[in-house]
Image (tube, rainbow, N blue to C red):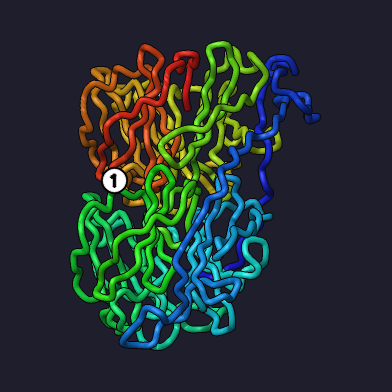
């Protein structure tokens, strides 16, 4: 991994509507107008909608200080205790983009990142620099991993930054698992290779080079390290497969083989959409409705009976959560038949928040050439795209320059996420002949790299949809519906010249829906989901299983036939 300081990004707070026929064509959106050259498009801006405020979560835990569990060896230092009271704490991010410390008695608002970056994942690894106080690792969508002192996160300068970490779909804090007294991490690739990064205790170069632990770890959809579960003073690992079976991997304290063979803990753990570790052997497990359960280790590699410890924990991101982080889209737009644009935010519990109107009534009447792409830069907002003639505009950016030209021949375009494995969001576009092309993003949202042919024959589909990872490997996928109603999965490969594996049949009957879309992750498990509107105007959601299929449809409600498009 190379080392570099991250570039600062300007925070985007506005949507930009583009027209070429005067201020009134999309004038219902106009709150301000920017001067432009005579031959440039006219721009109109509206304030970007904000995520609905979520209820402040509650947490009640038994008091258990460091060292009170381990019985046969000295306990590891607490992984994250920013207030220094001797009790482990949790770092999380709410829907407002603010980060919070959940302490023993209260939640402390740390604010949002002033740089505009929305971190794809945050990890609390313990002490990585050999100084007093915990640190935080923060990962961007483009693969920059930065080390912060906990007291300066999220708005202070990093102690260290490394690049190229997009090659991993999961990074796990493990405490010291090699016996040298320094905190380590492990990282997993989409293909299931697990690597050890030993800590150095030096903030300017916190990790040694990677060392392979072994293959096969892609069978798990949750991977996290609770700390020491069996009382030997070495942190352990737990892993859950897609069937809900949970396994225990005992730490050995040896760099050459840091984990012993797996031992089954039990089944039924797919009742939770997240497993979260805070160290000292403890695990939190969150249900889809936001209830949080506390599991105390039993001293032999398992857990004591669960204890309900909190409610309203449908937060956007936990530090040290077990799933692959979902980045770049948790939203849905609806364009009404009358031309009014509405915005929905996902609640992380399988539902959508109440809609917010983002244009005046009829402001978009007559315009249909929209796309809604997973974030094209590190700010994490999904990008609303609009084609005017042959030009493609990113409506999330100030300025009147198109991000691409020559797009007049495309009848479908979408942005399912990173398709070539470089950590940057990409676009797909289908022309009238049925050829599908890949346009690689540059990580800025302002430009695209020249197109690559994915293949012909895509005019066999009347819908192509993607909003992130559907299969649980961290790579972006898409689904495509044939004219006979059969839905097909195209699993992402992360390779530019062959971005998808051969199609796999999901099932028939999807022609019951006149609109299909993906809002990203609706239920907080880190996987993208689907929604569809039937002929009666009922909206149904489909939660991904992580295996390339979907759970049973859930009816969200009626009235969705008032939209001409969902995206």
* Residue in the picture at 67% in, 31% down: 16
* Residue in the picture at 60% in, 31% down: 393
The answer to whether any part of residue 495 appears in the image is no
Q: Which residue is mark 1?
A: 546
Q: Is residue 30 left or right of residue 552?
A: right
Q: Compare residues 332 and 230 and report the one nearer the observer.
A: 230
* Residue in the picture at 59% in, 58% down: 107
* Residue in the picture at 28% in, 77% down: 230
Q: Is residue 443 left or right of residue 209?
A: right
Residue 145 % position (x, y): 51, 64
Q: Compare residues 393 and 551 and report the one nearer the observer.
A: 551
Q: Compare residues 115 and 536 and report the one nearer the observer.
A: 536
The answer to whether any part of residue 475 appears in the image is yes
Residue 519 occupies quadrant: top left
The local secondary structure at tag 1 comes to loop
Rendered position, 68 above or below 296: below
Q: Compare residues 526 and 394 and report the one nearer the observer.
A: 526
Rendered position, 68 above or below 102: below
Rendered position, 214 above or below 73: above
Residue 430 occupies quadrant: top left
């Amino acid at each position: 991994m190379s080392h570099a300081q991250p570039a600062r990004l300007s925070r985007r707070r506005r949507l930009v509507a583009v027209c070429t026929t005067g201020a009134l064509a999309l004038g219902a959106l106009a709150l301000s107008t920017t001067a432009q050259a005579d031959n440039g498009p006219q721009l109109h801006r509206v304030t970007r909608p904000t995520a609905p405020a979520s209820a402040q979560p509650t947490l009640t835990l038994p008091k258990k200080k460091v060292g009170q569990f381990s019985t046969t060896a000295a306990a590891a230092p607490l992984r994250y205790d920013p207030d220094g009271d001797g009790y482990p704490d949790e770092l999380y991010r709410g829907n407002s983009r603010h980060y919070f410390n959940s302490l023993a008695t209260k939640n402390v608002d740390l604010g949002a990142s002033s740089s505009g970056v929305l971190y794809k994942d945050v990890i609390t690894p313990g002490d990585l620099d050999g100084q007093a106080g915990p640190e935080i690792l923060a990962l961007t969508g483009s693969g920059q991993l930065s080390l912060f002192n906990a007291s300066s996160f999220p708005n202070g300068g990093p102690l260290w930054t490394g690049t190229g970490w997009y090659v991993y779909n999961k990074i796990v804090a493990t405490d010291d698992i090699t016996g040298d007294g320094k905190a380590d991490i492990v990282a997993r690739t989409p293909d299931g290779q697990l690597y050890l990064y030993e800590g150095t205790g030096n903030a300017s170069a916190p990790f040694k080079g990677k060392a392979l632990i072994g293959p096969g770890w892609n069978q798990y959809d949750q991977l996290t390290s609770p700390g020491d579960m069996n009382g030997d003073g070495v942190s352990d690992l737990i892993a859950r497969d897609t069937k809900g079976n949970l396994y225990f991997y005992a730490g050995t304290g040896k760099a050459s083989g840091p984990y012993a063979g797996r031992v089954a803990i039990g089944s039924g753990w797919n009742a939770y959409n997240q497993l979260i570790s805070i160290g000292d052997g403890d695990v939190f497990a969150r249900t889809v409705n936001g209830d949080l359960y506390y599991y105390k280790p039993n001293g032999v590699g398992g857990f004591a009976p669960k204890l309900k410890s909190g409610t309203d924990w449908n937060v956007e991101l936990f530090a040290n959560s077990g799933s692959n982080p979902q980045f770049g889209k948790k939203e849905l737009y609806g364009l009404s038949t009358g031309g009014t644009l509405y915005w929905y935010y996902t609640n992380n519990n399988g539902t959508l928040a109440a809609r917010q109107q983002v244009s005046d009534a009829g402001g978009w009447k007559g315009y249909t050439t929209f796309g809604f792409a997973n974030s094209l830069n590190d700010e994490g907002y999904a990008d609303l795209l609009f084609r005017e003639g042959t030009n493609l505009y990113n409506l999330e950016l100030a300025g009147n320059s198109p991000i691409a030209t020559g797009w007049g021949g495309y009848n479908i375009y979408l942005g399912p996420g990173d398709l070539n494995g470089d950590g940057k969001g990409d676009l797909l576009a289908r022309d009238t002949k049925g050829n599908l092309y890949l346009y690689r993003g540059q990580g800025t949202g302002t430009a695209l790299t020249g197109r690559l042919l994915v293949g012909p024959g895509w005019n066999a589909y009347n819908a192509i949809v993607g909003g992130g990872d559907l299969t649980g490997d961290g790579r972006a996928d898409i689904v495509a519906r044939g004219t006979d109603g059969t839905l097909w999965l195209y699993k992402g490969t992360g390779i530019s010249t062959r971005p998808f594996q051969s199609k796999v049949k999901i099932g028939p009957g999807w022609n019951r829906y006149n609109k299909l879309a993906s809002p990203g992750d609706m239920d907080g498990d880190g996987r993208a989901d689907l929604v569809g509107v039937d002929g009666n105007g009922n909206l149904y959601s489909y939660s991904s299983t992580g295996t390339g299929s979907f759970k049973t449809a859930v009816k969200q409600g009626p009235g969705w036939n008032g939209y001409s498009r969902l995206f």
